[in-house]
Amino acid sequence: MAKSAEQNHWELLMALEDHLQANHVFKNGFDGRPCHSDSYMTIVDFAALDAAFAKSEFSADDWKVGCEYWLTNENMQPPLRLVGHTIERKLKKASA
């Protein structure tokens, strides 16, 4: 059975977040250990984000889907909002 567009949407979002996690974009604010984006006192390692974005196999359209979700979901945690804004700026700069 074919997957619905909604299933594909959620799988893409999870793949993007897994990519960020695997590249240690989210760190514990106390000791710098890698952690989950929803963990208490999470900070964004922007150098790791730059590297993860540069070496990803995701298309600009894939990242746009992630940004739209991270920036418009009212229950989104601050670290993913920061990632969304940063990636959105990178995409705008690349298309200019």
Image (cartoon, rainbow, N blue to C red):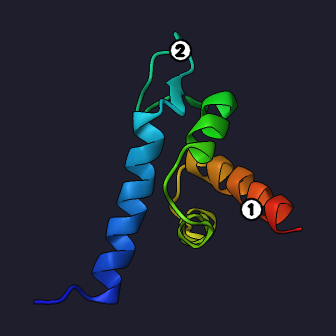
Residue at coordinates 40% horizontally, 35% vertically from top-left?
22
Most extreme residue toward the right is 96
| Circle 1 residue | 91
Mark 1 secondary-structure assignment? helix
- In this orientation, does residue 38 appear? no
Q: Position of residue 39 (x, y in %)?
A: 43, 34
Mark 2 secondary-structure assignment? loop
Q: Where 1 falls versus 7 (above or below)?
A: below
Q: Position of residue 28 (x, y in %)?
A: 50, 21
Horizontal side of residue 89 vs 20, given as left or right: right
- Quarter containing the N terminus: bottom left
Q: Which of the pair 53/57 is nearer the observer?
A: 57
Q: Which of the pair 84/78 is nearer the observer?
A: 84
Horizontal side of residue 6 vs 16, given as left or right: left
| Number of residues whose C-alpha sits closer than 10 Å to that of mark 2, classed few (under 14), some (14–19) or many (20 or more) | few
Q: Position of residue 10 (x, y in %)?
A: 35, 71
Quarter of the rendering containing residue 87: bottom right
| Circle 2 residue | 32
Q: Position of residue 29 (x, y in %)?
A: 57, 20
Q: Where 95 falls versus 4 (above or below)?
A: above
- In this orientation, does residue 69 appear? yes
Residue at coordinates 85% horizontally, 59% vertically from top-left?
93
Residue at coordinates 39% horizontally, 66% vertically from top-left?
12
Q: Where 87 falls versus 20 (above or below)?
A: below
- Quarter containing the C terminus: bottom right
Distance (Cα) linking label 2 and label 1:
28 Å
- Which is nearer the N-term, disc 2 or disc 1? 2
Residue at coordinates 46% horizontally, 16% vertically from top-left?
33
Amino acid type, residue under disc 1 in the picture: Leu
